[in-house]
Image: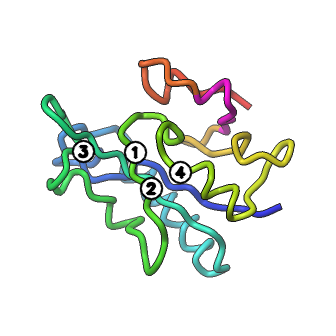
Amino acid sequence: MGRALVIVDIQNDYFPGGRHELVGSEQAAANAATVLDGFRRRAEQILHVQHVWEGEGAEFFEPGTRGVEIHDAVRPAGDEPVVQKAYPNSFRETDLESRLRDAGVTAGAGRPDRAMSGVNGRRVRSDRRCRRDSGRGDRAARCRA
């Protein structure tokens, strides 16, 4: 069974001075950077997911702004791939699932769509039932492990 680190939406707009500052973003980025460093040292698979909000009404993650850029603490290095997404759900209309599958990343019943992730210190499951885009964003679509 393969492993991968998937870093999702650690982007400048969530940090102080950004358009949508979140509480605890700096600590979350520091924690992610520690994990990222370990994966890099072990030459394990790493994928970055970047939310890009295009079109009128974009409140943050707008293309061409500093806010849309991945934060320096976890900036992709070398050939680490970046999957861009247009929806809160990282699997919706992206190739994330196929990249995980192609990299041999499996969990649960040997399926990357049941991969486990850590979110703010909690473990959550991302399976097909949880990935449905409910129009309320990722937080509404998460399922506890």
**Marks 4 & 3, CB-CB < 8 Å contact:** no
Q: Quadrant of the C terminus?
A: top right
In the picture of the structure, the residue carrying the numbered disc 1 is 85
Specify which label sits upstream in the sequence, 4 or 3: 3
| Circle nearer the N terminus (1, 3) | 3
Q: Nearer the viewer, mark 1 or mark 3?
A: 1
Give the amino acid type for the residue marked by disc 1 in the picture: Lys
Question: Would you say residue 130 sits in the magenta stretch?
Answer: yes
Which of marks 4 and 1 precedes in the sequence? 1
For marks 3 and 2 on the same chain, the one whose residue lies earlier in the sequence: 3
In space, the residues marked 1 and 3 are separated at their CA atoms by 11 Å
Name the residue that disc number 3 marks: 61
Q: Are marks 3 and 2 in contact (CB under 8 Å)?
A: no
CB within 8 Å, label 1 to label 2: yes
Residue 122 % position (x, y):
63, 38
Q: Quadrant of residue 71?
A: bottom left
Q: Which amino acid lies under the numbered mark 2 shown in the image of this protein?
A: Val
Query: CB atoms at circles 2 and 4 under 8 Å apart?
Result: yes
User: What is the three-letter code of the residue carrying label 3?
Assistant: Phe
**Vertical side of 17 occupied by 59: above or below:** above
